[in-house]
Image: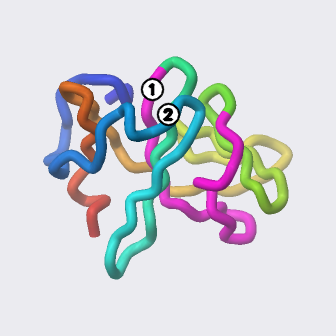
Amino acid sequence: MDGRRGRADARTSPGVCRVEDIPPLGTRVVRRAGAEDIALFRCRDDRIFAVIDRCPHKGGPLSAGLVHGHAVTCPLHGWTIELDSGQAQAPDVGCVQTIPVRVEDGIVHLAMEAQG
């Protein structure tokens, strides 16, 4: 799934928001009772990515970071996380869980297993 459209390989959630609810080069947080929050990111090319909203370094909120390209820079210590893989860019080492995204008719859906 490319974050724009396509068939979901897994069951997906009811829509969590509309694409336009996420500002370009911005974020939106999906709060989940009893589970970690999910950060949604909208890149310049309108691709949508979702990751657990916790930097693998010191646990900072990635949703408060700077979105650039297909990456986000954590506001606490400057780690840059690739949004498609969740991997930290070198020289940093770490990974955040990514959540499969499907966009259909302008509505953002997340994989059900991420709904906790």
Amino acid type, residue under disc 2 in the picture: Arg
Q: Are marks 1 and 2 in contact (CB under 8 Å)?
A: yes
Q: Earlier in the sequence, mark 1 or mark 2?
A: 2
Magenta stretch in the rendered image: 46-67
Q: Position of residue 31 (x, y in %)?
A: 39, 66
Residue 99 lies within the magenta run: no
**The disc label shown at residue 47, or none:** 1
Q: CA distance from mark 1 to mark 2?
A: 6 Å
Q: Is residue 52 magenta?
A: yes
Q: In the image, residue 84 lies at what x, y percent?
A: 52, 36
Label 1 CA crowd tier, 10 Å (few <14, some 14–19, many 20+): some
Pick the quarter of the image with the N terminus: top left
Viewer-proximal residue, 57 or 22?
22
Q: Does 10 sit left or right of 17 as displayed?
A: left
Q: Which residue is mark 2?
A: 42
Disc 2, SS: strand
In the image, 93 versus 77, the foreground residue is 77
Residue occupying the point 69% across, 50% down: 65
At x 65% / y 37%, what residue is drawn? 67
Residue 95 against residue 103 in the figure, above or below: below
Q: Residues within 10 Å of mark 2 (few under 14, many from 20)?
A: many
**What's under tag 1, amino acid-wise?**
Arg
Quadrant assignment, res 100: top left
- Would you say 82 lies left or right of 1 here? right
